[in-house]
Amino acid sequence: MVTPQSQSMKDKMPPRRGQPINVWLLALLLSLVSAPAAVAQTVHTLTNAMDVLALSASNALLAIPIHVKGVVTVAEPTWAGRFFVQDASGSVFVDNRGNNQPSVGDVVEVWGISHPGGYAPVITAPHFKIVGTAPLPPAHTVTIERLMSGAEDSQRVKISGIVRMAQENTDRLEVELASGGYRLHAYSPVPPGINPQSLVGAKVILRGTAAAAFNAPLRHFVTVTLFVSQLEDFIIQEPAPAGVFDEPLIPLNGIAQFRMDRSPGNQVHVKGVVTYQRSGQDLFLEDKTGGLQVKTSQTNLFQPGDVVEAVGFPAVDNFLPVLEDAVFRKTAAPRVELASTNVAVADLQRGLHHAELVTISGRLIDRLVKGIGQKQDNSDIRTTLVLQTTNLYFTAERDTTEENSLLGSIPIGSLVQVTGICLLESDADGKIKSVRILLPTSHNVRILQKPGWLTPQHLLISLAVVFAVLLLVVSWSVMVSKKNLVLKSLVREKETAQHELQEAHDQLEERVHERTAQLKVEMTTRKESELQFRAVLTERTRLAQELHDTLEQTMTGIALQLDLVANLSDKNPGNALHHLKLARNLMRQSQVDLRQSVWGLRSRATEKFNLANALMTNGRQIAGGAGIHIGVETVGDTVALSEVAEENLLRIGQEAITNVVKHSGATHVRIELEYTSKKVILRIKDDGKGFNPEACAGPGDGHFGLLGIRERAERLNGQVQFTSTPDQGTCVRIEIPVVQPSESVIPSESLEEHEERI
């Protein structure tokens, strides 16, 4: 359940549970536009308080219809019509703002719609009908931890504790209850004929409705206020001790010491001299045993040196003893002259002199001035001096309504002596964390020694002079750096020029190397041309010798046979016919030899030689009578070859086709001539019966064809490969490197002279 923060605890106003009507209507319209599905799922009417409290904030914003019936548990007159209603499931707040208000105990039927409220869902835009009266529902006992968590908001609960403060506020009794380390406020009707102060220290049981106070923009829980609606719900379990000021006095340093009769709800009676008072906040007392901070809401003033008695509840603040919720009275003892104690740093570090009037010296190292709030329309200004002694930093504080000119005029670095109330802050292990001195007046600070010449102001001036010198040095350095940059730029330009010169030199050397390589290539080419020329001459010489040894001898044999035929034709015609047949055979052999010689002797100077055409023509002549189809295919751009290369490739092709005709029994032969920039590949494929290259006849058997092909390929620095499988044909592959023919022209005289020599 959401209980908004009360407008004023003293006015007993509940927290603002709902929002103005126009706000939730706008939210409702937006939710209806953006979430029609959610509305469709929650159109049923909620009929008990717990269903309302179970809504999420987003669902409660959907204005779900509500109809509940229950008993009014709280309806404060200052709430302007709003109230809590409780049924069998629980209690919920009804934001009945500005309308008639039911009374506590009325049984009402309430119709309204849901709203998320500021903390928990509420019923808003209600109308109700009183249908009777009934006793208030029983309150269930809860732990103080659960109550202070906000989980029991709007519910009737039962809690016990000790009254720490009680006062009558108009027609209501305001009580501050301490329970289990927590404190909460409760409001109830004023019991007749009772002094509220007599309730302080009493153990009570309260039954009432818990209302949460919260931060509405953040929907964050802050605290809980308990509203007791009837006198019978305010139960005094154990009255406060009577005559607490008649109890034995306890030394100021004894409130935190071991006592057999010590109880957290018992008040103690102390007495001491007032050393400092902050009206409505605390009072500092001191006796022979030490000092004590006594917290109180009383505003009656005492003078330093007054002897007073105080009754309060012992407690621990920052792990140091303190007396809380105390009441005072002045004794008839005469005023005592105050005397401070000069303390040593080691004693403070041991935890001594807490809440005592002490005097301590230190050097002022800093000063802080800041406002701390509003008081009687004047801003409180706290001036804090940060001091340093041998091995301790501590502060001296003074609150004034105007800026403290006296403390503000003390030069930083001065050695000062301060007199005031020592407040220590300790941790759980008893180790002192900080030391604060509360100054009763600004005159409690005395300058023992002003700072030397090296004050912060002088230090700033010195730093300014040093800064100016550094600025000059930096300016001079910048000027020198600029000159250095110019020099570096010149050096860099010279280095760049030298680098470019070196690059030009390197390029020249590279070009010399390239030209040298070109010359070597040209010389190599010229030498190759000479070698090719010599090879051509050698080949022609061989062909001439071949013609001489074959064709001429054959013709001579034919002539002899014909002469014999002429001589025997009349005498012995049968023998003459035999010699005629021999002459015819010699003629056929001479034709074969002649064809080969013709191809070898064809002049390249008088016609454009084409290797592919030559292979086609030669192949068809060789295979013309064998019924073999010859096909030639050229791959790639034709590359000009040397005469030696073309002649040897042609001879290799002739030999390969001759072998096909003699041995393969093929019907088709395919000649492929492939040109690339670096090599020429010649392939002769047939579909004949094939052979085993490793087991075929060779020179030892009188067959020199394959050997001749290999020798010609090796003569051209090439490679030859025979691929054949029985009954699957044969492929002869010859690969030679491309050597461009020399541009030099062989003088025709040399050829003529050579021919004449032959």
Image (cartoon, helix red, strand yellow):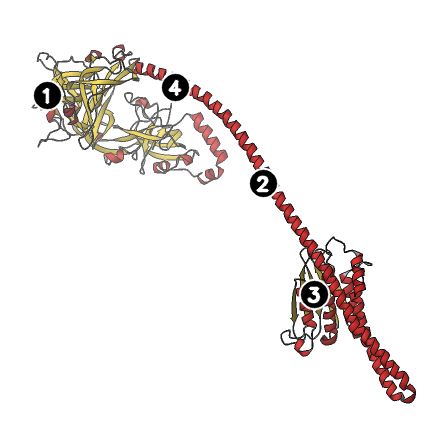
- In this view, 199 is above or below 675: above
Q: Quadrant of residue 247?
A: top left
The residue positioned farthest toward the left in the image shown: 248
Nearer the camera: disc 3 or disc 2: 2
- Earlier in the chain: of badge 3 and badge 2, it is 2
Spot occupied by residue 584 in the image (x, y as percentages of width and height): 84, 79
How far, Cα to Cα, is label 2 from label 1?
114 Å
How far, Cα to Cα, is label 3 from label 2?
48 Å
| Label disc, if present, on residue 683 of the rendered structure | 3
- Earlier in the chain: of badge 3 and badge 1, it is 1
Asked whether, in this view, residue 476 is left or right of residue 338, the answer is right
Nearer the camera: disc 3 or disc 1: 3
| Label disc, if present, on residue 506 of the rendered structure | 2
Q: Quadrant of residue 172?
A: top left
Residue labelled with disc 4:
470
Amino acid at the residue labelled 4: Leu
Amino acid at the residue labelled 3: Arg
How far, Cα to Cα, is label 4 from label 3?
91 Å
How far, Cα to Cα, is label 2 from label 4?
51 Å
- Earlier in the chain: of badge 2 and badge 1, it is 1
Secondary structure at numbered mark 2: helix
Amino acid at the residue labelled 1: Phe
Secondary structure at numbered mark 3: strand
How far, Cα to Cα, is label 4 from label 1?
74 Å
Asked whether residue 634 appears in the rendered view, the answer is: no
Which image quarter holds the N terminus? top left
Secondary structure at numbered mark 1: helix
- In this view, 589 is above or below 440: below
